[in-house]
Amino acid sequence: MPDFARGPFPATRMRRHRAHSWSRRMVEETALSSNDLIWPLFVIDQVESESIPSLPGVERLGSQAILQTVEQACSLGIPAIAIFPATDSSLKTEDAIEATNPDNLVCKTVRKIKERFGDEIGVICDVALDPYSSHGQDGLVRDGIILNDETIAILCQQAIIQSDAGCDIIAPSDMMDGRIGEIRDALDEQGHQDVQIMSYAAKYASSFYGPFRDAVGSSGNLGSGDKKTYQQSPCQTDESLHEVALDLLEGADSVMIKPGMPYLDVLQRVKETFKVPTFAYQVSGEYAMLSAAAERGWLDRKQIVLESLLSFKRAGADGILTYFAAEVASWLNESRK
């Protein structure tokens, strides 16, 4: 710190670097680019796309639109997309067996994307049973109890068929204990040693997921139930470090914090403690809040979205899953012209 006893006050003026745009850019500590973005995409097994009322501007993408959207992502320099299925209700069962069908919606979609785009873009697949279960839980249920070990066996099968289809990154979001190690072993045994695992290591039982559950059609299935017996309590932060440490020991290549902005403290602690690739998910509730405020003219959409994503980077995120990805990439690319 400067010695203010020497010389006239103020000897140091913090505003000097802020006086000009070029000067602010020259000394900026944190920067956001399209390389930081992962675009979550919802897919549906029909030709036409569908709007999602609770996620204005986001659609369940039909068979034609998904390839056009991936092409857009490639043109914008977005390095990866994450695929989430809106599974037909007729395919949802107690045992979520559709999750292990090699011709299910996710696998068909991944194959189409990889046939068209190859390694031009990374494809991330969610591993959990809630899009396929009639009860809306991420795991198998018996007598009202979420079964941990029995669920992991299904998750391993799900991860294998997604990798067979061409998935680059398996992203287990189920929060079952020990699933990362079992999935890693299962993938390796099937020759998928190069498939990455991005673990939802610190996933909270949050109220910010409502629009997502609408999008994949699981909110009605879950009903009055909750996921508090396996997702983390919002009260916990030390526990997140324990969860992350276990998943890294089991073979996770990267970890994720979910939700995002309400848990920036967790994100920062994880990144500072482990210094591994760390991602954050700006979840559906965050998107819906910012979009609604912008629609009403209460906030400037571009400025508030960019500021919110910059906060993720400042807290230590190496990448951000956000439904704003295409907009943000367009804004950033335009600003660099």
Image (cartoon, rainbow, N blue to C red):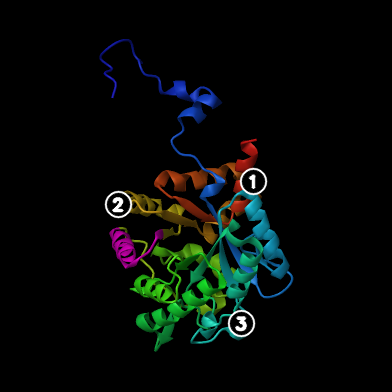
Residue 90 position by quadrant:
bottom right
Q: How many marks overall? A: 3
How packed mark 3 is, by other alpha carbons closer than 10 Å (few <14, some 14-19, many 20 or more), is: some
Which residue extends farthest bottom? Answer: 143
Residue 22 x %, y %: 54, 25
Where residue 41 appears, as percent x and y from the top left, is 60, 63
Tell me the residue that label 2 is attached to: 273
Amino acid found under the numbered disc labelled 2: Thr
User: For the magenta stretch, what is the residue range?
Assistant: 238-255
Name which residue type carries label 1: Ser
Residue designated by label 1:
330
156 sits left or right of 269 in the view: right
Which x, y percent locates residue 153? Answer: 41, 82
- Residue found 43% across the figure and 78% down from its top: 156
Residue drawn at 61 percent across, 36 percent down: 336
- Label 1, label 3: how far apart the Cα atoms are: 36 Å
Q: Is residue 266 above or below residue 225?
A: above
Q: Main secondary structure of the magenta part?
A: helix
Q: Secondary structure at mark 1?
A: helix
Disc 1 crowd rating (10 Å Cα; few below 14, some 14-19, many 20+) is some
Question: Does residue 141 lie above or below 32 as drawn?
Answer: below
Q: Is residue 90 magenta?
A: no
286 left or right, relative to 272: right
Q: x, y (%) of residue 133?
A: 52, 81
Q: What residue is pinned by disc 3?
A: 89
Amino acid marked by disc 3? Ser
Q: Is residue 177 visible?
A: no
Q: Which of the marked residues, 1 or 3, is nearer the chain's N terminus?
A: 3
